[in-house]
Amino acid sequence: MNANRTETADCVVVGGGPAGLMLGVLLARAGVDTLVLEKHADFLRDFRGDTIHPSTQDALADMGLLDEFLALPHADLPRVMLRYGGRDLVLADFSRLPTRRKAIAFLPQWDFLDLLARAGSREPRFRLLRRTRGVEPITEGERVVGVRAEGPGGAFEVRARLVVAADGRDSDVRAAAGMVPRRIASAMDVLWFRLPKDPRETQPFVQAGDGTLIVIDRGEFFQIAHVIPAGTWTADADGLVAMRARVSRLSPAMEERVGALGLDDVKLLTVRLERLRRWHRDGLLAIGDAAHAMSPAGGVGINLAIQDAIATANALAPILRERRPSMRELARVRRRRELPTAIIQRVQHALQDPLLAPARSSRIPLPLRALQRLPFLRHVTGRIVGVGIRPERVRSNQPRRGARSTK
């Protein structure tokens, strides 16, 4: 490709994460000529969530992909356990969910994205361009008519009926379009590191009482997210010593291993809770983290992003086969997804203080005591985490027999 080349599509999706790839596959299956731009050559990055929630597994079943998904090495989590002050407590129970599978599946996100990319490659109307970055929208007056991109062959343009920004919380396309999210909170940061593990060793998913550890079992090692107050990490010897001490208090079994960590082994992830007031402009729609950045609390960010993609495909696929969506039609996606997003972000905001607070006594906090004494509450939290608010179901959106696409 070169600067003189112009690609065309019914829809161009910027970003090959969960939202972008899911949307790309669903639109292509519905007869929409779809081009997905992914700036990396592959999906092998550590800073991704590994939780595939029951509602997402239902979506995969609707798409005929569940068996292929389950054939991949994964681990099931039928309930979320919390170790607090040395005691193991149940935070969420998925056993009564109205879903095909009643467990969160832990799978490296690069495997999940490869699964979606393979599914897309089987669709004649799906194209994925790797090592290709969406730079900025192409506008005619106030209308977005495509996106400028940069790939291995240089700069080029993609003209489309709709541009979807699914390129994350630091979206270049969103920024270039002048869409600025409203910050809700940023009280925490996350330190991200790996620790070796014994083959049969297990750890609770969440450990709290002096800050919080989230432990992801990746088979050969533990991937650890250590939640700390925002702005408190100092990347020096003193900061490392303090971090080692906190982790050792939370999980004494990890003391020796965390003591071997160096500064280069620890990565800082800043956490933002923010949301666009308006997710669209004429010819452009933002979804996933580009529309609403989430906290890691509950691991629900990937779930919300996929729900956005399903809602977008359900609402817009029949329209995109024929013409450009109107402003009112684009607004339907925000109206459909804004309430679930706002509720989850409010819950995540409320969880920030408990996630950060040290244990002040041996007494278990009242909300945790209630979850242990009233089992139905654990099923309520299980539904919020595992299914979410207003879950989306994949529609067939099959093109009409004989329908033809016109640009």
Image: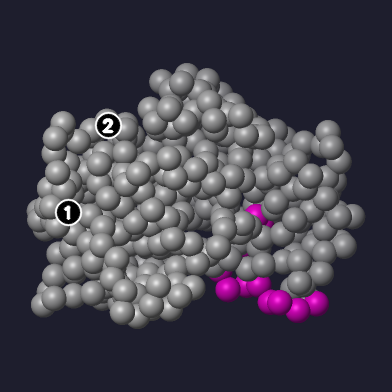
Q: Kindly tell me whether residue 257 is visible in this rendering.
A: yes
Residue 330 circle label: 1
* Residue 395, numbered label: 2
The coloring applied to the image is one colour
Q: Is residue 105 left or right of residue 324?
A: right
Q: Quadrant of residue 13?
A: bottom left
Q: Amino acid at mark 1?
A: Leu
Q: Is residue 79 left or right of residue 293?
A: right
| Location of residue 242 in the rendering, given as x and y in whole percent from the top left corner | 77, 68
Please state which of residues 145 and 209 is positioned toward the viewer in this rendering.
145
Quadrant containing the N terminus in the rendered view: bottom left
For residue 369, say whether it is visible.
Answer: no
Q: Nearer the viewer, residue 121 or 37?
A: 121
Q: For numbered disc 2, what is the local secondary structure? A: loop
Left or right of 320 on screen, residue 112: right
- Which quarter of the image is occupied by the C terminus? bottom left
Chain part drawn in magenta: 225-237
Of labels 2 and 1, the one closer to you: 2
What residue is at 26 percent from the left and 58 percent from the top?
9
> Residue 371: x and y, percent?
54, 30
Q: Earlier in the sequence, mark 2 or mark 1?
A: 1
